[in-house]
Image (spheres, rainbow, N blue to C red):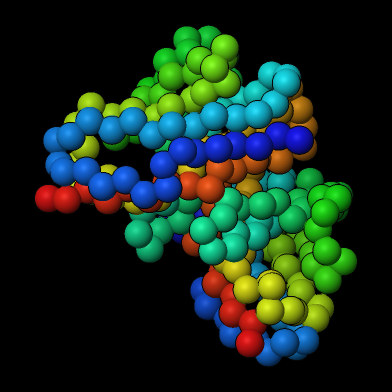
Amino acid sequence: AQSVSQHNHHVILSEAASLELGCNYSYGGTVNLFWYVQYPGQHLQLLLKYFSGDPLVKGIKGFEAEFIKSKFSFNLRKPSVQWSDTAEYFCAVISAPGNTGKLIFGQGTTLQVKP
Amino acid sequence: DAMVIQNPRYQVTQFGKPVTLSCSQTLNHNVMYWYQQKSSQAPKLLFHYYDKDFNNEADTPDNFQSRRPNTSFCFLDIRSPGLGDTAMYLCATSGDRGSAETQYFGPGTRLLVL
C-alpha cells in the first residue's frame, strides 16, 4: 500500500533561516507529488506539485521541492523563511496515471517561525 | 470569494446521535471528496463523488454515508457516531479525477463526539 512519511513533526526556525522538510513515499509505480500548506485558521491549499519534467519544481511564496526518484523523496525547501510561513505542511502522493483522485497524505509538519 | 464552503465549522454531537456535515462549492467541479483527519494524523480519504457516481474507499466504515443532490452540494452523514469519529472532516473538489489535478479544500468541520 502507498504511504507517505514526513520525518519532522515540528520544526522551529528563526526568520531568515533556511528550511528543508523531508518527505518520503512508499510506492512501486509512478506517482505525482504535492505539497499542501495550511496557514493558521485557513484551509489546505496547494503549494506546488510535480508530475513530469524538471524534478526541481517551484511553487508559490519562494518554495521549491526536488523529486529524487531513486530516493523516493520529495523534500520541500525555502532559502529564507519568514514569520508568515508559520503553518502546517503536508506532503501527498497519488498514483499516476490514474483516475481515482486518491491523495495519500503524510502526517504533516508544523513549522513555527520565530520573528 | 470562498470556493469550497463547509458548514458547520464546529459540531458537537452525542454518541449514537446522527449528524450531517455539509459542503458546497462554487467551482462547478465534477469531483467532490470527503477526508477524515484525526488529531496528529494524515487526512484520509473516505469517499468521493465523480459527478453522480459514488466511490467508497474499501476501509470506510458503513457508518459513513454521503449524498450529492446536485453539482454544488455534498453531504457527509454519520449514522451512529462513535467516540472514535471525533475528527476534522475535510471536503475537497477537483475538476476531474486525473492524477495531476489539484484538489481544492474547504476549511473543514471539527466534529466532537461525546
Q: Nearer the viewer, residue A49 or B86?
A: B86
Asked if B63 appears above or below B16 in the picture, the reply is above
Q: Nearer the viewer, residue A80 or B99?
A: A80
Residue B99 seen: no
Quadrant of the rendered image containing residue B68: bottom right
Give the side of residue B36 with respect to residue A34, left or right: right
Asked if A63 appears above or below B4 in the picture, the reply is above
Q: Residue at x 53, y 10 (%)?
A: A53
Provide residue B72's location: percent of width, then percent of height.
67, 59
The quarter of the picture where the C terminus of chain B appears is bottom right
The quarter of the picture where the N terminus of chain B appears is bottom left
Provide residue B113's location: percent of width, then percent of height.
64, 82
Provide residue B39's location: percent of width, then percent of height.
54, 64
Q: Nearer the viewer, residue B41 or B67?
A: B41
Asked if A10 appears above or below B8 in the picture, the reply is above
Provide residue B86's location: percent of width, then percent of height.
63, 73
Q: How many marks?
A: 0
Give the side of residue B25 with respect to residue B48, left or right: left
Q: Residue at x 71, y 46 (%)?
A: B31
Q: Residue at x 82, y 50 (%)?
A: B57
